Image (spheres, helix red, strand yellow):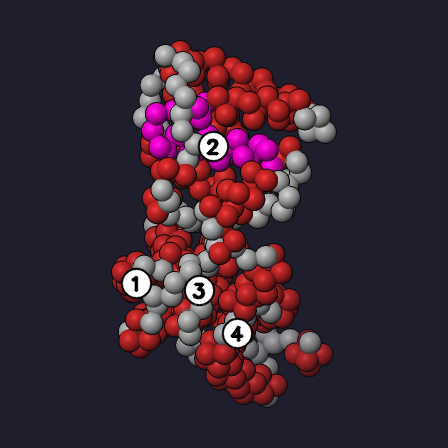
């Protein structure tokens, strides 16, 4: 679970007032769109979120800028009417805004930038857009260039034609992987994968390719010794290794994807159990222990970031108090009248619906649902030109 070792985010304090202003503009736009059920009111919020994202990118905060970018993508699609679940989209955006504000507080206070802390919020935003969810390995970031090429085992160049050899490797890899997946309790398949990965590494010319297959071979050794759990996400990476071999056979340029695949495999080495000599050696070489949190630490810090912050609660509590007082006064007037007066600019059922939307933002889903039901009942009476009886009013 990645954490940036240095903390270059003191500059957040210098521009925090501007960041807060942008956050406030986004929040106002989201609240207005929710209250009026009109996504055209999100124009200013989108502009503010664009500026916020660019600012966070200049601050070089991977976590905060990634979250802002996911929010921006959802907001853009929402304004373009490409999202069917408008209510869920607005709720996810508001929750993302709360998390982003809290995350900036963390960075400003000297906390490390840990994008993995934001994984639940990122996936909530992506789910509304029906985009593939992110895995923990995807958010593991490592600068491979700072490690010396001399650390990588040298190549032996035992084959003359890499393309021809890769055609053979591709078939062998698929067969060995299938054997392993069909019976993970039998090490025959994974042993063949280790041997094949070593052979490929020994024949690669570029540093990037040699490093990838060195890490791949170590990953297979970790699986062999049960130091690394063989899960579905990891199997998806094995499929990508197979595609890498196929690209070598086609003489395609694989450089742009090679380091990404290497880094993701290193994530699983980072969280592996101790005990396998090759795995432990690689973890020490890449200093992976400095880049990960144990699961308990990660969950503890994640709860702190994902919780609602005090500033938002204070803002919402004021809004809720004002809305509740208005509804209470209107209900008192209703008790004195024979019908629900719809001559006001905002009817009582609309006021209750607004209150429901507000408390939904702070996670009170059941209370929000009950208020929405009450709003719908009052709306029916208003449209019929009558009023509910006293028992129904109390309910």
Residue 73 at x, y = what percent?
Answer: 37, 51
In the image, is residue 267 above or below residue 256? below
* Percent position of residue 64, x then y: 39, 61
Residue 134 seen by the camera: no
In the picture, residue 181 is in which quadrant?
top right
Q: Residues within 10 Å of mark 4 (few under 14, many from 20)?
A: many
Task: State the residue position of label 3.
Answer: 112
Category of crowding for the residue at label 2, using alpha-carbon neighbours closer than 10 angstroms: few (below 14), some (14–19), many (at least 20): many
Using the image as rendered, state which of residue 117 and residue 93 is in the foreground: 117
Please name which of the two marks, 1 or 2, marks the residue nearer to the observer: 2
In-front residue for pair 239/349: 239
Which sits in the foreground, 289 or 271? 289
Q: Residue at image x 42%, y 74%?
A: 109
Residue holding disc 1 = 59
- Where is 219 relative to 140, above or below? above
Image mark for residue 291: none
Residue with the mark numbered 2: 214
């Amino acid at each position: 679970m990645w954490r940036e070792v240095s903390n270059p985010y003191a500059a957040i304090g210098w521009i925090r007032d501007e960041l807060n202003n942008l956050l406030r503009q986004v929040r106002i736009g989201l609240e207005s769109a929710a209250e009026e059920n009109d996504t055209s009111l999100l124009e200013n919020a989108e502009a503010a979120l664009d500026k916020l994202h660019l600012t966070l990118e200049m601050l070089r905060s991977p976590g905060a800028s990634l979250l802002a970018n996911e929010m921006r993508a959802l907001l853009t699609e929402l304004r373009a009417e490409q999202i069917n679940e408008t209510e869920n989209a607005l709720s996810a955006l508001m929750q993302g805004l709360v998390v982003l504000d809290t995350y900036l507080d963390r960075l400003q206070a000297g906390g490390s930038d840990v994008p993995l802390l934001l994984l639940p919020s990122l996936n909530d935003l992506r789910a509304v857009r029906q985009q593939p969810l992110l895995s923990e390995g995807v958010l593991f970031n490592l600068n491979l260039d700072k490690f010396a090429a001399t650390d990588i085992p040298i190549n032996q160049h035992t084959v003359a034609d890499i393309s021809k050899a890769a055609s053979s490797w591709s078939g062998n890899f698929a067969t060995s992987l299938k054997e392993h997946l069909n019976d993970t309790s039998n090490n025959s398949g994974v042993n063949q994968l280790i041997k094949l990965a070593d052979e490929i590494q020994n024949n690669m010319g570029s540093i990037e390719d040699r490093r990838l297959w060195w890490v791949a071979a170590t990953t297979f050794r970790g699986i062999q010794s049960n130091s690394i759990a063989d899960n579905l996400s990891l199997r998806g990476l094995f499929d990508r290794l197979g595609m890498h071999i196929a690209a070598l056979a086609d003489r395609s340029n694989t450089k742009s994807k090679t380091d990404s695949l290497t880094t993701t495999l290193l994530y699983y080495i980072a969280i592996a159990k101790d005990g396998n000599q090759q795995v432990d050696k690689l973890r020490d070489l890449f200093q992976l222990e400095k880049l990960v949190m144990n699961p308990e630490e990660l969950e503890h810090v994640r709860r702190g970031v994902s919780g609602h912050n005090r500033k938002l609660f204070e803002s919402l509590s004021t809004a809720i108090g004002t809305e509740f007082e208005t509804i209470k006064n209107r209900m008192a007037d209703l008790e004195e009248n024979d019908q629900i007066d719809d001559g006001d600019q905002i009817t009582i059922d609309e006021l209750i619906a607004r209150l429901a939307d507000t408390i939904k933002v702070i996670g009170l889903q059941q209370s929000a649902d009950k208020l929405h039901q009450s709003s719908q009942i009052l709306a029916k009476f208003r449209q019929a030109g009558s009023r509910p009886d006293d028992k129904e009013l109390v309910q």
